Amino acid sequence: MREDLNELRRRIDDADRKILSDLEERIAISRKIGVLKREEGKEFYDPAREEQKYRELEELAGFESRPYVKELYETIFDISKKHQNKPAFGVLGRSLPHTYSPQIHSLMCDEYSYSVIEREPEELDQLFSSGVFGGFNVTIPYKREAFARCDVTDEAATVTGSVNTVVFDKDKTYGYNTDYYGFLFMMRRAGIDPSGKKALVLGTGGAASAVEYALKTSGAGKIWFCDLETEINYSNVYDECKDAEVIVNCTPVGMFPKIDKDLLDLDRFPDLEACLDVIYNPSKTLFLQKAKEKGLKTAGGLAMLVAQAYKAMRFFKGETHVSDVITDEDSAVINKVIKILESEMMNITLIGMPGCGKTILGQELARITGRKHIDLDDAYTEEIGCTPAETIETMGEDIFRANETKVSSKYLAMSGLVISCGGGIVTREENYFPLRCNSHVFYIERPLESLASAGRPLSASKGVEVLYAQRKDKYEMLCDHKLSYGEFEDKQEFLDKASKEVLKFIGTEE
């Protein structure tokens, strides 16, 4: 049987994605080897090992690739050595399983390598004196520890007592607070001007101190702080701060995975104009979504995260003074990285009537993008122990919907997935926030006569016309983009057209 050219091209695309994934892992391991060699005082280049590797790889290679293995790996080895020899920087914390800092710095600058540096408190002195890194960003819980170990600090760090960027230069250690710069950018990007405004800051940690400094230098009026055990707390804040015009959340409340939490009743602040949240996962916290529903200006923490990294990057590159004035050129670089991160972090979530193609399109998008695909009906079966159809038939739709909300909320709160939802997920208002908090939501609209009802008890019992009438407006309201198609000659035609439209919308069209 003659092979199909388009199918062969799809297979070679899949092979390229696997190669790139493996290459990413190999270069990352090379960077880690470089750090270890620095720590142990070893040379980066080992010619004897390199020759041994050539021989081993040629023996392992198949007959198609063997003639090209040495040529290929000469390039790979050169890249690995170059990566290992770059100046080494990183992000310091105690536990950093989900940090985006390495990705942000690699998007901004390729002049240095960037590692995750996890250390216990008793290991900090050795790290600061090791000479392995040219510097690092610092996250909780070590910002004040870093401040104490710096010889010279900038004004923002000195005022806040908090350092989030360390640079080693000859015999001195320099400390900077670039969180302050990040928050300035976050406000500017959202069009929020605190000048003369009364501001309420939730939390009293390191982020709150940077926010306070940024608010003061931006001309804010009165600034209150609210926390669990401070003079102003969550029991008296509505009396003490009822005329707040700007509220900033500097606490972890609402952060993944506990996304369904917030702290305040915004209706009790009649003068409120803007809400900001330093949390960046999820991208739209419950606090911000409630503010947006009230028509307030909002800003999420991703802009702050990327902007503080931008200023840190300039210190890492050797600049000794970076102005707090944010130029159009600065904004262009920061916004470009924000856009890339948003497209990668946010889920691609598919909604629509049962049988409209959500599952097969989700599988195709996962194949193209390298993301993991989650079919919420399959996830339901795995976690509940029976299928949605079995639950509906034996326990009723209400029990199924309650279970569906529990399962879907778990996956919709995650990042970087392709998610195919059940057709009726839009029937419960409890699902609206999880659907919107971390997803680009796409509604697939197809002709009703093309929707299959086999194995779908609600479609069979109520009829697709009735279900569509009940759900259409909700699909329209919740989606960011509608994929509206008629009939197709074959399945692949639908997949090609729909996947191209989705990727174009999120800005990653191939």
Image: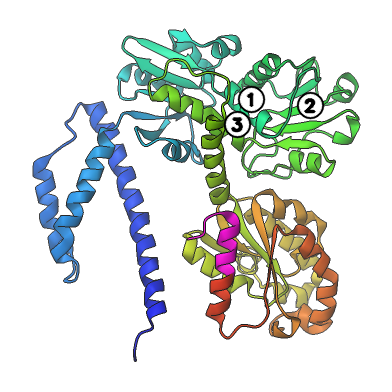
Q: Position of residue 224 (x, y in %)?
A: 78, 17
* 507 relative to 97, above or below: below
Q: Amino acid at mark 1?
A: Leu
Q: Nearer the N terminus, badge 3 or badge 2?
A: 2
Q: Which residue, given by chain and number where applicable, does mark 3 sit on?
A: 304
Q: Quadrant of residue 182?
A: top right
**How far apart are the two marked residues, 3 and 1, measured between alpha carbons?**
8 Å
Circles 3 and 1 in contact, beta carbons < 8 Å: no
Q: Main secondary structure of the magenta part?
A: helix
Q: Residues within 10 Å of mark 2 (few under 14, many from 20)?
A: many
Q: Residue at x 44, y 37 (%)?
A: 102
| Mark with earlier residue (2, 1) | 1
Q: Residues within 10 Å of mark 1 (few under 14, many from 20)?
A: many
User: In the figure, is residue 93 to the left or right of 407?
Assistant: left
Q: Position of residue 347 (x, y in %)?
A: 60, 55
Give the labeled residue for mark 1.
Answer: 184
Q: Which residue is mark 2?
A: 246
Position of residue 172 relative to residue 294, above or below, is above
